[in-house]
Image (tube, helix red, strand yellow):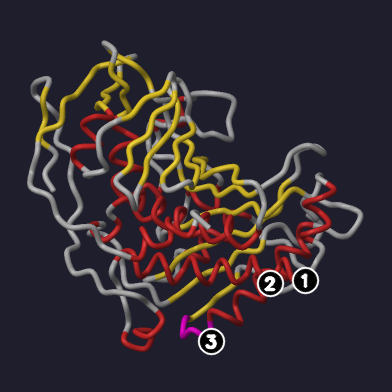
Amino acid sequence: MRVLSILILLSIATKAFAVGEWTLVKHDGRDYVTLDNVGAFYQVGPLRQAGNDFELCNGYRSLRGQAGSHEFFINTLKFILSYPIAESDGRLIVSRMDLTKLIEPVLRPSRIRSADLVDTVILDPGHGGSDTGAACVYGTEKEYALDVALRARSMLRLLGFKVFMTRSSDVLVPLEERAKFANRFQNALFIAIHFNSGGENATGIETYTLAPRGVPSMAADGPALSDLVPCSGNCRDAENIALACATHAALVRNSGLYDRGIKRARFVVIRDITVPGVLIECGFLSNSGDARKVALPAYRQQIALAICQAVRNYRNAVGAHPPTLASAVDSSPSNRTIPIVQTPTSSRAAFPK
C-alpha cells in the first residue's frame, strides 16, 4: 500500500540542506511561501498543476492538494491545513504557519531538537463510568476505548515501554485530572483513545493534535480570542504533529477505514499536557459499517497494534532509541536540529536550518 510510504518517511532522517532564502508573500494578512519554494527546498521536484490540482513528487515523497482547499496530502496521508492553499500573482502559496508547524516537522522529524527519548506511554481511554460516550447496538465507546487501551498496554510492555493508564476500569476521570496525570511523567507520549459519532453517513479515522497558538480549532465554529491564548501543549507543537503523523498513518493502514485526516483542536487532554500527545477517533459508532467493525475484537486488536507501531515509528523518526529496543527500529539519525523561523525585516527571509 502507498500509505506505507509515510511510515518509511518517518523512519529515516532526511539529509541536511544549506541555508536558503524563502520568499514571503502577504495574503489575507498572513505570511505565505510559494509551493515552488517548498518544492525546491525539500527537493521534491518541480510543481505540476492541472487546473486546481497540484503535485510535487520526487519518486519516494509526494505533496499534493488543491488550490482553495485545506486538504493536503503527504505520501497519500491526509492532513488538514490551518489555512487553505491560496493563489497570489498566479503562484500557489501555503501559509508560513503550515510550513513551520506541519510540513517541516513531518518531512524532517529528526531535526526536532526538543524531542525526548521516549520510554513511557500514557494511554487515555475516553469516557468511563456514567459517561458512556458514543454508543451503538453492539456496545459503547467507553468499553471499546478501554479494551483497545488494555490491548495496547500489553503489547507496549512487551516492547519494553513503561505504560500508564488514566483509567484501567469503568470509572469516570475528569478531563483535567487526565492531563494532570500525564504531566507527572517525563520522556513520555500521551494517546487519548476515542470512537466517534456523527450520523449514519459519517465514517473513518481522525487524529487530532493541538492547534498552534493563533490557529482556529477545527472542532470550533470559527476563530475566537481563545485561539491566541498559549496552551501548555504548544511547547510540543513539532513533536505533536510528528506523533500525529506516525499515529494516523498506522491507524489508516491497520483499520482499513476512510482517512478523514490529521486535524487541529484544543481538547482539554491535548491542550493541557506537557508531553507530546494526540487524540484518536477510531471509527464512527453512528455508522453501521464502522460500528460492526469496532465491535469485533480483531479490529480493536488492530487499533492497539497501530498504537504500538505509531510509538515505535515516532521514536525512530525523532532519532531517540534506547539500547533495549535497538532491534525494533530501523535507523539512528544523528542530525537533530530544528529550523527556527526568523521574523522577516523585508520581503525575503532566511529560515536557518
Q: Is residue 259 magenta?
A: no
Disc 1 packing (10 Å; few <14; some 14–19; many ≥20): few
Numbered disc total: 3
Instruction: Report the residue marked by disc 2.
Output: 301
Q: Amino acid at mark 2?
A: Gln
The Cα atoms of the two marked residues, 3 and 2, are separated by 15 Å
Q: Tell me what residue is drawn at x 26 percent, y 74 percent.
A: 332
Instruction: Report the residue marked by disc 1.
Output: 297
Mark 3 vs 2, N-terminal side: 3
Locate residue 159, reporting x and y percent.
49, 84
Viewer-nearest of labels 3 and 1? Answer: 1
Locate residue 5, reporting x and y percent.
43, 57
Q: Amino acid at mark 1?
A: Pro
Residue at disc 1, secondary structure: helix
Horizontal side of residue 115 vs 196, given as left or right: left
Q: Tell me what residue is drawn at x 61 percent, y 68 percent.
A: 166
